[in-house]
Amino acid sequence: MDDFQRGIKLTIFLIAAVFLFFTGRLFWLQIVDHDSIGSRSGSIRRIWEQAPRGHFIDRNGVTVLENRALYTLKIIPSELRESSVPYLAYLLEIPVEELKAKIAEAKEYSPFAVSTVYRDLNEFVVARISENLWRLPGVIIEIEDKRKYSDLFRGTHLFGYLRNVNKAQLDTLAEKGYTPDDKIGFTGLERFYEEVLRGDKGARYELVNPLGMLVGKYNEGKSDVPSIKGNDLYLTVDAELQQLAENLLRATGKSGAVVAIDPSDGGILALCSEPDFDLDILNGKTRKKEWAEIALSPQKPLFNRAVQAAYPPGSTYKMVLAIAGLEEGIIKPEDTILCTGGWTYGGRTFHCHGGHAHGTVNLKKAIIESCNIYFYQLMLKVGLQKWNEYGKMFGFGQREGIDLPGERRGLLPDAAYYDRRYGKNRWTKGYLVSLSIGQGELGATPLQLANYTATLANNGVWHEPHLIRGYRDTRTGIYVPMQHESRTLPVSKQTFDIIKEGMQGVVMQGTGTMAQVPGVTVAGKTGTSQNPHGKDHAWFICFAPVENPKIAIAVLVENAGFGGSISAPIAREMINYYINEKNKPKTEASAIKAVAKVKAINDSLNTKPPAAENSAAGAVTDSTSTAPPAAEESTD
């Protein structure tokens, strides 16, 4: 009897053990390892579908950035047979080891997730792989999108480019739905407006057999979720003016930047930096050799000089000092000084450009002929504090707030800055002499100079510069305008009228006569930015027409010497197009002629620098300066 009872207990124990084993195995397969069992047996497979990014449309309704088809090879690592890898590499025409490395990277992220291993397949390769998909389980060919750039202009530093989401970014972006398969805006507008442009992913559900081969659509596709295209951005940029600006700047053969602004609202009409590069090098599949040349180039084509480089503004800054003097009651327009060509202060003699004597000089003449001595003396009367206050009013020493990443503040020194740099009571008023003519530690970006010019044109109405007017919501079809800041400076109209009169004289009879445009009143100012690494940088700022400003421009050409000779003609051709030619029938000949003019001027001046000079050397950042503390002579 005892043996019988022991037998029953043993049987029950064995049955319980078997039951527990199967229960545990079922739990493991269904709960813990459900992804694995799903991928090895007949199951439903979800494939994410990338959303097309939004388009860019210029101020005239021209689409300047859209999408085109991109063939992409994707894999599910757990379904891909190791024996298929050499054959797949053969079809792709790439080394086996390169493909294995990509597969290993995909497997590290997730063995069961769909991962991209190769983009931008040509149609021949797509056809070969498609014919052999039956023998390549775990391999998927997808049609996605890549960017199609404008044929009119490059827009390198405007548009920016996309890059794959990296592992570091995934730590913060995964919660927003990003995967290693995704591309994200890395620079330019693509980065700044990533959330607006990216759209929403879709999902496709497929039935696959136990070998991972496609059987058909799940639920006849009724469960699929369509992707939602990103929102289209409406730019303030004029595509043809942008094209002209790029071509004119490129024709100089030098580095530099051009920024044009609509004074009525702060909208950027054109913004370019030279050198630039072809964005298609990074579009779809990166062309590695060309990208390496760009990244390692001493000319720094990745550097957006329009917003990321700060230079001494030279004589273009003299109007800030003049406004401070007028508004504080320190000078009157009719007050004069005697310019003998030299002025002694602190035991040192400072000269006007070229040592020329200007004779009796009032404010208007000082602006027109760019008399340094007038402004040397005015600076000592105004003082550093007031000079700094008026500079801040116009946006210097702070970010303008443009919708591009990486904007620099520039540098607007004050007493606290000099105390930090040189020590308290270890600097003198002699340091102010350089500041009076826009030299010394002062640093401004081309964007800041352009917006300052627009503010002068507006009689003191400052607008936040911007590239985007608004966007069209893809879901609703409704246009959503962007809001931008504006403010009015506490400066009288009378003061602005005096400044404008002087700037108009610069173009009519002074240092900027090469900016004259038939039938258009132009106000401008030349400037020279001293560069210890080579020839001086050439500035020219202007706006037109004076009576009803429609465009304000800042042109900087590095290592070019005198702004009136090389920068002013660029501004002239841009004004002529925008005011005189824009609404006329377009002819290619007129655009080519404008570029040829600038190139001819540059060639005649024989100013093309060696490669070492044609770089970002001489540009200053927020914390450095290329000019010595002592005053130097301006050459404009």
Image (spheres, rainbow, N blue to C red):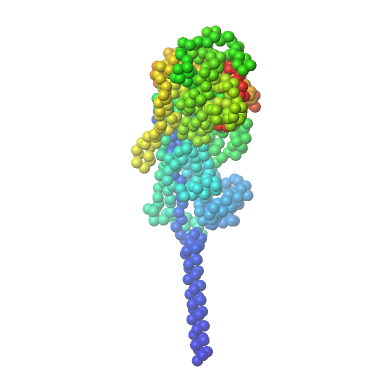
- Image quadrant for the C terminus? top right
Q: At 37% across and 36% down in the image, what residue appears?
A: 480
Residue closest to the far top: 359
Examine the image and state in which quarter residue 357 appears. Answer: top right
Q: At 46% across and 26% down in the image, what residue appears?
A: 393
Q: Can I make out residue 183 in this image?
A: yes
Left or right of residue 220, residue 448 in this image? right
Compared with 557, 31 (above or below) is below
Residue 343 pos. (x, y %): 59, 13
Q: At 59% across and 23% down in the image, what residue appears?
A: 428
Q: At 49% across and 32% down in the image, what residue appears?
A: 399
Q: Can I make out residue 273 in this image?
A: no
Examine the image and state in which quarter residue 255 appears. Answer: top right
Compared with 623, 500 (above or below) is above
Left or right of residue 391, residue 473 in this image? left
Compared with 482, 40 (above or below) is below
Residue 478 pos. (x, y %): 34, 38
Using the image as rendered, state which of residue 346 and residue 183 is in the foreground. Answer: 346
Residue 350 pos. (x, y %): 61, 15
Residue 183 pos. (x, y %): 50, 43
Using the image as rendered, state which of residue 317 and residue 16 is in the foreground. Answer: 317
